[in-house]
Image: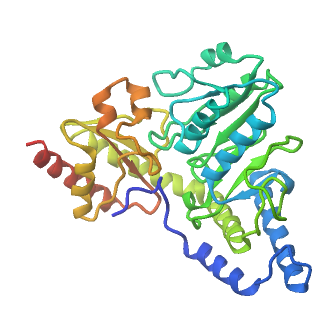
């Protein structure tokens, strides 16, 4: 029983079939001048046009990457090194993925200043504080639209309105946990990151949306590609599979969301009846992610106890290495809760019976492990 969909989703049969078929049908490098290369290039352009249409952007605004981690690194380093003459002040939140946090730490070595925005009780950014912290030398605001650990949905439109008052500042949104789950618009953002493997696509492909007219310094140099901002042979089968995964996820989102909302209600109703569990997710959390703390039980111990019953959850974001959940601590200011977090993430594939089994095993294992 899988409850770690926010870490990665199983690839859909349709997406995998697209990948296999393109591998076989288009063997040529899209950069090659011979017929096979030209055919691959033509198909690549079609896939890019489809993705652009789904995102409601221009094909020229899409940069293919290996995933959201590369996309985040590309925009953060690319913007800051390109525009450091404007200033070195960056604003972000305590909820960001490690692929945002670590590049920001790296930039501090070069004299950049990183400030973390205060949060309201529900976990959303304090917009008044954002107004007060914006400066003439602020060059980047980077915010995840949905936090990977708590599932908290940020008011991206309201944040964008504040950032746009400062024309020298860019707004980057990590939508890795957003797309396919919550309606979105890229109209008011300058950059957006995403990964295919969060929407039932293949690992190793993602994209960075970069608004037309903005220049950045590339993370990877050398070799012709689909754009000057990311060198390397275009991964045509992966790109085609991304187009398929994105189309399916957006088409099926309303139906899938209804199922997840039902499973979330069932899960939260059951969790509230188990002694020792505190729910950290707030009323601003999307139904796909439920974060809990379990008093007096080490999360790793509970995780492996569930694993023995073939139930798979996560302690934090899969890419986080810290013992303490900084995200939960930022929200709750409670050290014990931050040290004992479990993330349960749901999907339209999650069944009622799986939820009932999880609740029963959780209750039994918590009672056993607390003695």
Residue at (40%, 47%) from the top-left corner? 264
Q: Residue 226 location, x and y as percent?
A: 83, 62
Q: Is residue 166 left or right of residue 265?
A: right
The C terminus - image quarter: top left
Residue 121 versus residue 351 in the image, above or below: above
Residue 191, located in which quarter of the rendered image? top right
Outermost residue toward the front in this view: 109
Q: Is residue 273 left or right of residue 31?
A: left
Q: Residue 155 location, x and y as percent?
A: 62, 30
All told, the count of numbered labels is 0
Outermost residue toward the top in this view: 132
Q: Is residue 259 left or right of residue 370?
A: right
Q: Residue 81 location, x and y as percent?
A: 76, 36
Residue at (77%, 83%) from the top-left corner? 26
Q: Residue 186 location, x and y as percent?
A: 74, 43
Residue at (62%, 80%) from the top-left corner? 17
Colour basis: rainbow
Q: Is residue 158 left or right of residue 345?
A: right
The N terminus - image quarter: bottom left
Residue 59 versus residue 167 in the image, above or below: below
Q: Nearer the viewer, residue 106 or 128?
A: 106
Residue at (53%, 69%) from the top-left corner? 11
Residue 222 versus residue 319 in the image, above or below: below
Residue 342, located in which quarter of the rendered image? top left
Outermost residue toward the left in this view: 371
């Amino acid at each position: 029983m899988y409850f770690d969909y926010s870490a990665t989703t199983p690839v859909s049969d349709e997406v995998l079939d697209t990948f296999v078929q393109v591998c076989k049908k288009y063997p040529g490098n899209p950069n090659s001048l011979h017929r096979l290369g030209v055919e691959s290039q033509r198909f690549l352009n079609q896939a890019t046009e489809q993705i652009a249409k789904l995102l409601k952007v221009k094909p020229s605004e899409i940069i293919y990457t290996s995933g959201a981690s590369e996309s985040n690194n590309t925009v953060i380093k690319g913007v800051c090194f390109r525009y450091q003459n404007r200033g070195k002040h960056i604003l972000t939140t305590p909820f960001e993925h490690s692929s945002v946090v670590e590049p920001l730490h790296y930039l501090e070595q070069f004299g950049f200043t990183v400030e973390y925005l205060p949060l309201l009780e529900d976990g959303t950014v304090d917009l008044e504080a954002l107004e007060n912290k914006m400066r003439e030398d602020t060059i980047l605001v980077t915010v995840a639209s949905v936090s990977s650990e708590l599932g908290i949905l940020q008011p991206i439109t309201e944040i964008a309105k504040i950032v746009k008052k400062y024309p020298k500042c860019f707004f980057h949104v990590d939508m890795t946990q957003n797309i396919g789950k919550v309606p979105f618009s890229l109209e008011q953002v300058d950059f957006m990151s995403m990964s295919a493997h969060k929407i039932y696509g293949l690992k190793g492909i993602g994209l960075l949306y970069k608004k037309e007219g903005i220049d950045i310094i590339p993370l990877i140099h050398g070799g012709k590609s689909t754009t000057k901002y990311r060198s390397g042979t275009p991964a045509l089968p992966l790109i085609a599979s991304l187009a398929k995964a994105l189309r399916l996820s957006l088409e099926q989102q309303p139906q899938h969301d209804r199922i997840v909302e039902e499973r979330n209600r069932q899960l939260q109703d059951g969790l509230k009846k188990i002694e020792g569990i505190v729910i950290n997710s707030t009323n601003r959390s999307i139904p796909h992610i439920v974060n809990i703390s379990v008093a007096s039980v080490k999360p790793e111990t509970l995780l492996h106890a569930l694993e023995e019953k073939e139930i798979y959850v996560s302690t934090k974001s899969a890419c986080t290495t810290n013992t303490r959940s900084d995200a939960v601590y930022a929200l709750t200011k409670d050290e014990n809760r931050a040290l004992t977090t479990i993330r349960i993430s749901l999907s339209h594939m999650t069944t009622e019976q799986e939820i009932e089994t999880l609740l029963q095993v959780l209750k039994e294992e918590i009672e056993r492990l607390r003695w």
